Image (cartoon, grey):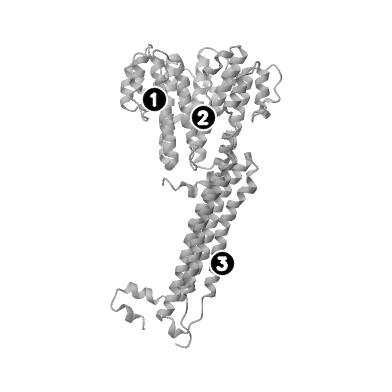
């Protein structure tokens, strides 16, 4: 196979890596993009939600404003869905003789990397926004002037997910599979 | 792991933490206490308290109020809140909440045993017991003649059983022995609670260690001061001190040999956190010591709320409410006995 000329007489692990089909890498990348993003969003929502419900018993006025924390966490899951849909449109059919071409491998790795970037960035973003949202609900229940200030912190936190999405989309833009002629 | 509690704390205890913080916002403030201190009669106090969270508990009381009624209803509110939290809690929070009440259980046991010794009626004693420390077989305590029977008949089924290993003797119960029993039980309880919090780890361990160490040190000082001039030997005194806290072990060695209050002051001033407490008192005075300790305790308890995602807030809230009830009792007694000039002697403002 042409790929074995690239590595020469190296260890069998790297050879094994190169034998994995780029379709596998792409599929795993897409799964991580959506799966881990939703994990982050769900984690954040439960952290915020439990504090919000408890605090709203004594201070019912906080419920409508503090739903914004839950919306920020939800946005993280939406980023994951969008990127997963974009990534799956990048998957193309490649003739079997060309599956292990370097260009093909590159496309597979690009989709995988994009998926990991988006997934894990959204995981920590969801956690961050969730924890801040919990503190925000508790502080707002005690002193309503604190809400807007803590919201600013949450906005910075949710920007982390956006960074992940931007880099992920740039990565996936270069996922070009070899064209059928070659 | 310390620092990452935020990730999983809310699964089991997020709701209850938010509830306890809501309760904390309902504690009486300095403005409320100022209003209460201006009251002329107990009915004025009831009227002022109706504007706070105590309204539903006091509104049905008939007009010639007693101070004991006010205190009883306020305690009832605390007990209701505690039971609500306890029934919602899962392990290990439920064990933690139960640990908070063992101190009251010990006080109730000692109250009944002392009362029986002085030939009081059991029903009357049961009414005076603190509701948080009640357990099922508490009335049977009146039957026991010495500590061994006490343990075998009643206490072996209660959560206090493991604390009795150090004080089972066959001596008859008298006032001195009962006080020693109380302090020995409390020492075992504090050490057990401390070990439990250390096992929980994380922010809970750190914050609770500080609060429990202060409690242990305060009890050591109180035991020392109360046993000056009594027949308690130095070794017995040393056995009553807990084995943790800022004063352990060197401070305890020095406290055990103290014979008067100035020597105690000399020992405590070597420790910076307690030096500030003793600096507020002039030489030879010990009446204000209790209030100084309460003020320091309230300061530390309020600090426990600064951090999120730990169990210390539950302990701190219970203690702060007990302080509030003490304040209300003092104010009511001063108003009822027409001694309003002394009202500020013992009221500790929380915020």
Q: On residue B319, which mark appears? A: 2
Q: Are marks 2 and 1 in contact (CB under 8 Å)?
A: no
Q: Name the spot of residue B315 as percent of width and height, x first.
A: 50, 34
Residues under numbered marks 2 and 3 in contact, where contact means CB atoms less than 8 Å apart? no
Q: Is residue B301 visible?
A: yes
- The image quadrant of residue B296 is top left
On screen, residue A127 above or below B351? below
Residue B118 image position (x, y, % from top left): 52, 12
Label 2 and label 1: CA atoms lie apart by 20 Å
Q: Foreground: B184 or B303?
A: B303
- Horizontal and vertical percent for residue B45? 65, 21
Residue identified by numbered label 3: A82
In this rendering, does residue A130 appear at all? no
Which numbered disc flags the more N-terminal residue, 2 or 1? 1
Identify the subunit bearing mark 2: B
Question: Label 3 crowding class (10 Å Cα cut-off): few <14, some 14-19, many 20+?
Answer: some
Q: Secondary structure at mark 3?
A: helix
Which residue matches tag 1? B274
């Amino acid at each position: 196979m042409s790929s074995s000329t690239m590595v020469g007489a190296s260890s069998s692990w790297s050879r094994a890596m190169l034998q994995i089909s780029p379709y596998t890498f792409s599929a795993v990348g897409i799964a991580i993009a959506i799966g881990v993003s939703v994990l982050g969003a769900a984690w954040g929502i439960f952290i915020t939600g439990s504090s919000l419900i408890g605090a709203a018993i004594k201070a019912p006025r906080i419920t409508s404003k503090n739903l914004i924390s839950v919306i920020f966490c939800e946005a993280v899951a939406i980023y994951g869905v969008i990127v997963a849909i974009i990534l799956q449109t990048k998957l193309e059919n490649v003739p079997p003789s060309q599956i292990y071409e370097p260009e093909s491998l590159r496309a597979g790795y690009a989709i995988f990397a994009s998926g990991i970037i988006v997934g894990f960035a959204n995981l920590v973003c969801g956690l961050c926004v969730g924890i801040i949202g919990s503190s925000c609900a508790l502080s707002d229940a005690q002193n309503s002037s604190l809400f807007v200030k803590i919201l600013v912190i949450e906005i910075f936190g949710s920007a982390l997910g956006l960074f992940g999405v931007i880099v992920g989309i740039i990565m996936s833009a270069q996922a070009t599979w070899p064209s059928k002629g070659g | 792991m310390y620092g990452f509690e935020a990730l999983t704390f809310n699964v089991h205890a997020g709701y209850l933490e938010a509830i306890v913080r809501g309760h904390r916002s309902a504690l009486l403030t300095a403005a409320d206490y100022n209003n209460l201190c201006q009251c002329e009669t107990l009915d004025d106090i009831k009227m002022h308290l109706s504007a706070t969270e105590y309204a539903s508990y006091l509104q049905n009381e008939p007009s010639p109020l007693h101070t004991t009624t006010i205190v009883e209803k306020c305690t009832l509110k605390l007990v209701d809140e505690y039971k609500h939290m306890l029934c919602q809690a899962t392990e290990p929070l439920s064990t933690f909440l139960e640990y908070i009440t063992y101190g009251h259980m010990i006080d109730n046991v000692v109250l009944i045993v002392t009362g029986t010794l002085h030939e009081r009626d059991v029903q009357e004693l049961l009414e005076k017991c603190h509701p948080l420390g009640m357990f099922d077989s508490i009335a049977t305590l009146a039957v026991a003649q010495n500590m061994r029977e006490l343990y075998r008949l009643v206490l072996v089924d209660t959560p206090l059983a493991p604390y009795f290993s150090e004080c089972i003797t066959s001596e008859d119960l008298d006032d001195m022995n009962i006080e020693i029993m109380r302090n020995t039980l409390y020492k075992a309880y504090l050490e057990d609670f401390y070990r439990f919090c250390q096992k929980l780890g994380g922010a809970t361990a750190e914050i609770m260690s500080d609060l429990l160490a202060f409690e242990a040190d305060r009890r050591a000082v109180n035991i020392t001061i109360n046993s000056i001039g009594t027949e308690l030997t130095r070794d017995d005194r040393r056995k009553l001190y807990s084995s943790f806290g800022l004063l352990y072990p060197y401070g305890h060695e020095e406290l055990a040999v103290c014979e008067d209050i100035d020597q105690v002051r000399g020992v405590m001033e070597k420790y910076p956190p307690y030096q500030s407490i003793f600096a507020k008192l002039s030489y030879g005075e010990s009446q204000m010591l209790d209030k100084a300790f309460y003020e320091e305790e309230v300061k530390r308890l309020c600090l426990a709320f600064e951090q999120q995602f730990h169990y210390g807030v539950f302990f701190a809230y219970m203690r702060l409410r007990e302080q509030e009830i003490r304040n209300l009792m003092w104010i009511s007694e001063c108003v009822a006995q027409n001694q309003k000039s002394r009202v500020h002697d013992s009221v500790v403002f929380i915020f």
